[in-house]
Image (cartoon, rainbow, N blue to C red):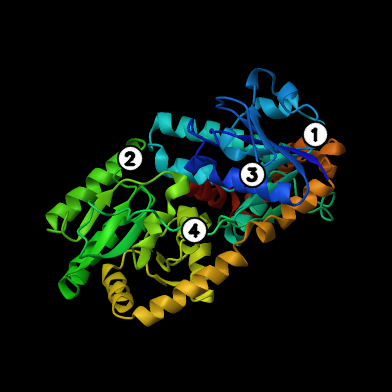
Amino acid sequence: MSRVSLITSKPVFSRDGAINNNGYMAWEIARALKRKGHDVRMLESEHGKDIVREGISVLGCDWGNVRKSVEGSQVVILPLTMMREKYFREVRDIPTVVDLVDPVLIESIFALEPDGEGMREFAAATQRVMNYIQNGDFFYCAGMRAYAYYVGMLSLAGRISPLTRESKLIASIPVAASQEAPKKPKQPFFAGKVPECKRLILWPGRIYEWYDAEVAIKAMVEVARAEPDAALVFAGAGDPCNDYSRKALVKSRELAKKLGLLDKSVFFTGWPPHSERAAVYAEPEFAVITFPESLMTLLAFRLRAVDCLWGGLPVISTEGDEVGDLLNAHNAGGTVKAGDAGELAAKMLEWLQSPEKVAEMRKNAGKLVSRELNWDYAIEPLDEFCRNPKIAVDKASGVAKSTVRSAFRASRLLKYKYYAHRAMALYRKGGAGRLFGKVRDVV
């Protein structure tokens, strides 16, 4: 077994000891590795006080001397969200796992403006990501779509090569569900927030630009007409945390008001502390999560959908992501086409009018999170690496960085050779006139 240090970008626990939503996945990974027998500690970049919980020490990570912070570790797990290039300059002899679950570059496409400043920030983010890609010893992402995306990135960086073909450099680790069963809430969470007579449909969590809350709100026009007691509740959206979620909330409220649904068939509320979130899932009949067709959708493995399944809620989701595939395969929910309010409304009404079908999907949701989406099962590739951690063979031989430089130089030479051969062929067929005519067309 190994001594594993898991670095986090945000505090795992709040001041009152409750787990932060942002620290959930890191904490569950630490716990799962601990159950496998590893000696695990967490190093917070934003740190309050040292604590020990479930045998896991939660300490601070001093980025002024990160080498000292990870001293004694046999494995370090570093999230891509940290974007700290200095780590690999200072830590060269400890096998380092890079957590690629959060698709940082794809998120920045949506977050940054398409102007000079935005493109400069995107270029800087790309450089930092490539630093991690070139220097990690093992990588994990969530889902096979993301796996294919990062295999392409690793290949372009020269990390997948004849030298590493026998190595397992990357694995898919799905975002799994909490090990603890949901606790029965002491009191209804939506009491006083939504009329008691309403049949609740849950939108879980905040709204961001890469979601499509508008199609869910538009679908409620038809749903409310057929089932007046139905209500779509955006739990968590009423408590925005940044400009992106604030803008999305304003836009969604304005649409609901324009359609005559606000505080009648569409409601916006806050979200409870992480340890009490089971209360959010206790009252609704099912959940809805919609998003547009995009790269974000393709690569996402949505924790909020997995958490709904943990809470016993079947989920209607837009098709096109990994969780949607699981919902359909295990009959724990269903999918609809992106942007189709009519199809979504029909699916919502079908479920509202088929309680037996929803009850069966609830059972299937429980089975799914106890098997495929169970951390002890999901963590196996990472556990395997931690049992026998090694510096990647291409790094150990000193060719990891030189390979990508050589590849780019070779690609330039091939390009120049191609154009030279094309120019000679054109000259032979039509002389200088044909050649210059073609150059003029291209330029």
The three-letter code of the residue at mark 4 reads: Pro
Residue drawn at x 72%, y 51% as measured from the top left: 35
Q: Which residue is mark 2?
A: 240
Residue 47 place in picture, x, y as percent: 57, 26
Which mark's residue is nearer the viewer, 1 or 2?
A: 2
Report the side of 405 relative to 350 (left or right): right
Q: Viewer-nearest of labels 1 and 4?
A: 4
Q: What residue is disc 3 on? A: 99
User: Which residue, given by chain and number where applicable, does mark 1 sit on?
Assistant: 94
Badge 2 element:
loop
Q: Is there CB contact under 8 Å for labels 1 and 3?
A: no
- The residue under label 1 is which amino acid type? Ile
Farthest residue, direction top: 64
Mark 2 or mark 4: name the one nearer the start of the chain.
Answer: 4
Q: Which residue is farthest right?
A: 397
141 or 237: nearer the viewer = 237
